[in-house]
Image (cartoon, rainbow, N blue to C red):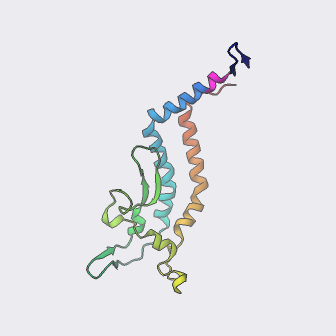
Amino acid sequence: MSVNHHSSVSVEGNNKLFKAIDNIARWTDRDSKKLVEIGHKVGNVYANYLKANVKDLGKDITVRSNKFSKTVVKSGQLRRSSGTWQPDKNRNQVMSGPRTNSIGRRKTKKNADGWFAHIVEKGDFGPRFGGKHRTQNTGIFERGKKATQSRALKLQLSLYQKEFKRYVKKSA
């Protein structure tokens, strides 16, 4: 540490740290596509779990929202809705789980829209109304998160470390 005559303090060695921080900042600009790609790979750990473990009902269900409109939920629709997406194209964040057109524009096919996933997760007739209508898929999303979280974090760490090596040189 040194003090100059203008009574300011400078810490030696900071230049290396600031240079490394600048490199990391440039990494997010230059390799935004790579960050998104890593996000999709990590998110697919959870999405693939869902695709493998969500059981199809075996029949279509008709949901009526009012007297005149109805929606048909196809067998296997929840399983097909599982995947990854980028909620904001201006950011590097990637989400994973059941995709739906009802939250933003996901370009999800009609027979792969998971708009009803929250009903499956919690049951369709809650205890406060005296019911427990549940299926073999009730709770699958929470179980999936617990089962895949550790594996996804390890994969994310290894992919980031592999990509960061070009931008951060370790100093001894």
- Percent x, y of residue 121: 50, 71
60 shown above or below 156: below
Q: Residue at x 55, y 40 (%)?
A: 160
Q: Residue at x 59, y 50 (%)?
A: 153
Instruction: Please tell me in which quadrant of the rendered image residue 158 appears.
Output: top right
The magenta stretch spans which residues? 13-17
- Percent x, y of residue 44: 48, 54
79 shown above or below 161: below
**Residue 15 within the segment the image draws in magenta:** yes
**Residue 162 within the segment the image draws in magenta:** no
For the residue pair 9 and 100, the one nearer the viewer reads as: 9
Say which quadrant the C terminus sits in. Answer: top right
Say which quadrant the N terminus sits in. Answer: top right
**Drawn side of residue 97 relative to residue 172, left or right:** left
146 shown above or below 5: below
Q: Residue at x 49, y 44 (%)?
A: 38
The secondary structure that dominates the magenta segment is helix
Q: In the orientation shown, which residue stands out farthest toward the front? A: 6
For the residue pair 64 and 55, the one nearer the viewer reads as: 64
10 shown above or below 58: above
Q: Residue at x 54, y 71 (%)?
A: 139
Residue 167 visible, this angle: no
- How many dots with numbers? 0
- Percent x, y of residue 11: 69, 22
Q: In the orientation shown, which residue stands out farthest toward the top? A: 5
Q: In the orientation shown, which residue stands out farthest toward the bottom? A: 130
Instruction: Please tell me in which quadrant of the rendered image residue 104 appears.
Output: bottom left
Residue 89 visible, this angle: yes
- Percent x, y of residue 138: 51, 74
